[in-house]
Amino acid sequence: MYFRNQLGNILIITSLAIIVFIYYPLWQLVFPLSLPGNLSAISGEYILIPKIYAWAPLIENVNPANESQYMKALSEGVAVAQGSAVIGTPGNIFLFAHSSEEPWLITRYNVAFLKLGQLKSGDEVILGKNFRQYHYRVTGSKVVSPTEVAYLNHPVAPLTLMTCTPIGTAWKRLLVFAQPE
């Protein structure tokens, strides 16, 4: 009899626990606690965008035309397009990442560009490689069709960041351009 009286409470608590489990990663992205403190101690390659609290490892040499390859890479961080310049050398670095994902698939890294649309001219983007930092300043942005791939082959800035827009869709691509400081 006691169990039957408490069944509603048990179902409510179970439902709330499931909701927290599913949406907690999204909560962390929207309301981040902090960014890594000592960036000079981080090995490997990463991107950091302080204004939007974005930080993720860079996944090198990802073919943007091979969906299975880039989907795997995007689950682990921000993809560096195949053929991009190496960080710290002349040429265009083309980075792309998700802006959204199914709530139960969200991790700290796979939606790193969730707030990319908030960047304005003058905002800072930091690329890290082998304990060194390379600082860039945003110079502009543009929304294009998914079929407009000319920006990959004919860049307008040394650093190009790309994600889908509006958030939750794949209708358009948001490109953010940056120059080294």
Image (tube, grey):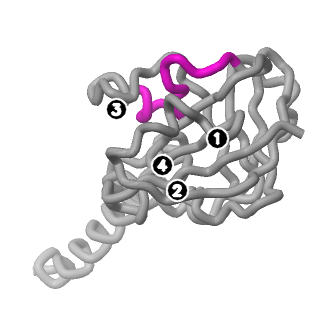
Dot in front, 2 or 4: 4
Query: x, y (%) of residue 62?
Result: 45, 21
Nearer mark to the viewer, of 3 and 1:
1
Amino acid identity at mark 1 = Val
Q: Secondary structure at mark 3?
A: helix
Tell me the mark number nearer the camera, choosing from 1 and 2. 1
> 10 Å neighbourhood of mark 2: few (<14), some, or many (≥20)?
many
Residue for badge 2: 114
Residue designated by label 1 = 156
Q: What is the spatial separation of the Cα atoms under label 3 and label 2, in whole angstroms?
A: 16 Å
Count neighbours of disc 4 (C-alpha within 10 A) and say few if under 14, some if 14 to 19, many if 20 or more.
Answer: many
Magenta region, residue range:
73-86
Relative to 167, residue 125 above or below = above
Residue identified by numbered label 3: 71
Report, in whole angstroms, how far the alpha carbon at label 4 lies from the one at label 3: 13 Å
Which of the 4 image quarters holds residue 23? bottom left
- Which residue is tagged 4? 163
Residue type at mark 4 is Thr
Q: How far, Cα to Cα, is label 3 from label 1?
A: 26 Å
Q: Secondary structure at mark 2?
A: loop
Above or below: residue 100 compared with residue 162? below
Q: Secondary structure at mark 4?
A: strand
Marks 3,2: beta carbons within 8 A:
no
Q: Earlier in the sequence, mark 3 or mark 1?
A: 3
Q: Position of residue 135 (x, y in %)?
A: 84, 37
Question: Callout 3, which amino acid?
Answer: Met
Question: Quick check: 79 left or right of 129?
Answer: left
Which is more toward the observer, 17 or 105?
A: 105
Above or below 89: residue 175? below
In reply to whether residue 160 is colored magenta, the answer given is no
Give me the C-alpha separation between circle 1 and circle 2: 23 Å
- Residue at the location (84% across, 19% down)? 131
